[in-house]
Image (cartoon, rainbow, N blue to C red):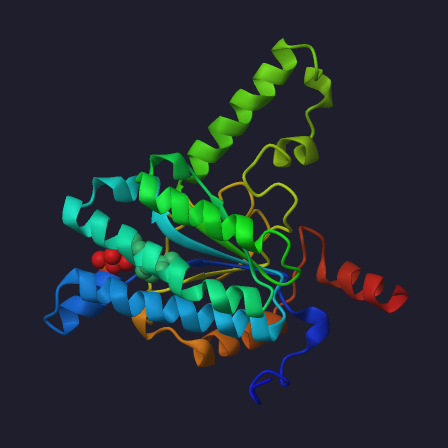
Amino acid sequence: MNSDIPSLQPESLPRHIAIIMDGNGRWARKRSLNRIRGHREGAESVRDIVRACREMGIEVLTLYAFSTENWQRPRHEISALMSLLKGFLRSELAEMMENGIRLNAIGQTERFPADVVKVLQEVMDMTRKNPGMLLNLALSYGGRDEIVAAARKIAAEVVAGRLQAEEITEAVFSSYLYTQGMPEPDLLIRTSGEMRISNFLLWQIAYTEIYVTSTLWPDFRRGELIHIVHEYQKRERRFGVTGDQIKKARRRE
Ligand code: FPP
C-alpha cells in the first residue's frame, strides 16, 4: 500500500464516493489544445482515481462519465468520448480482474452505440463476481430520468396488484433506482469549481457531504483525493440531528 494512505482513519472512510468529473474542455483550452485532448487526459485521471480508491478501501466509486444532456454535444466529441470509454474498458479489464474490481453502469446505456454496449456488457459479465470495489459508471445518466423511470416501474407494480400504494416507502422507492443495493454516497466531489449538482444522483445525495475543488478534472489525481478524504473525516455528519445528540450516541457505542 502507498504511504499516503495509512494517515486516513479507516473507521470513518467514506463507503461510497461519487465524482462529477468536470473541466476537461477548459484544461485543453488553457493549453490551446482541442477538447478531445482534455478528455484523453481526463481518462488518465480516471485510471489514477480508480486505483487510489481501491487502495483506500472505498466500497463504491461512482463516476459521472456521460450525462443525458451530453448527447447534445457535437457529434465528433460524442464519438471521441465513446471510443475513450471503450479503450478504457478494454485496457483496464486485466487490472480490474487482478484487483477484484466489479464494473457496473447506471443510466440509459441502451442509447450507446452497439459496439460500446457490447464491451461494457462483456466487462460487467467478466467482473460480476469480483469481491472488491464497485466501479459504477454513470453513462447517459440523468437523476430526474432515473426517478421518473423508478416511478413508472412502481406504478406498473401497483397496477398489476403486486404492490399497494401504502407500501411505497423511501426504502421501497430506493430499491427501484439504478443504485439499488448500494450505500448512498458519503462524499460527492465536483472538480473545476462549479457549484452545481447537474442532475447527478438527485435522490441519493440527500445527506451526502459535498466538496468542490477548482482543480480541472485532468489535473485531479490521487494526492488531492486523499486530501479531500482527510477533510471529509474532519466533518461532523449530523443527518438532521444536533451535534450534542451525535456526541451522546457516540459515547454510548
Ligand atoms: C466534463 O468536462 C467531462 C465529461 C463530459 C466527460 C467525462 C469523461 C472523461 C473523464 C473521459 C473518459 C471517461 C472514462 C470513464 C474513461 P467538460 O467537457 O464539460 O469540460 P468543460 O466544462 O471545461 O468544457
Is 181 rendered above or below residue 149? below
Residue at 33% x, 65% y: name it.
43
Q: Quadrant of residue 97?
A: bottom right
Residue at 15% x, 72% y: name it.
30
Residue 249's x, y, as percent? 83, 61
Residue at 67% x, 53% y: name it.
239
Q: Quadrant of residue 10?
A: bottom right
Considering the image in quadrants, where does the N terminus appear? bottom right
Residue extending furthest toward the right: 252
Q: In the image shown, does 196 or 23 lie closer to the viewer?
A: 23
Left/right placement of residue 161 relative to residue 20 reads: right
Residue at 22% x, 54% y: name it.
80
Ligand 1 shows up in the quarter that is bottom left
Q: Quadrant of residue 88?
A: bottom left
Residue 182's x, y, as percent? 63, 48
Residue 109's x, y, as percent? 40, 39
Residue extending furthest toward the left: 32
Residue extending furthest toward the bottom: 3
Number of marks present in the image shown = 0
Q: In the image shown, does 25 or 233 lie closer to the viewer?
A: 25
Considering the image in quadrants, where does the C terminus appear? bottom right
Residue 74 in view, yes or no: no
Residue 156's x, y, as percent? 58, 15
Is 246 rendered above or below residue 32? above
Is 199 rendered above or below residue 18? above
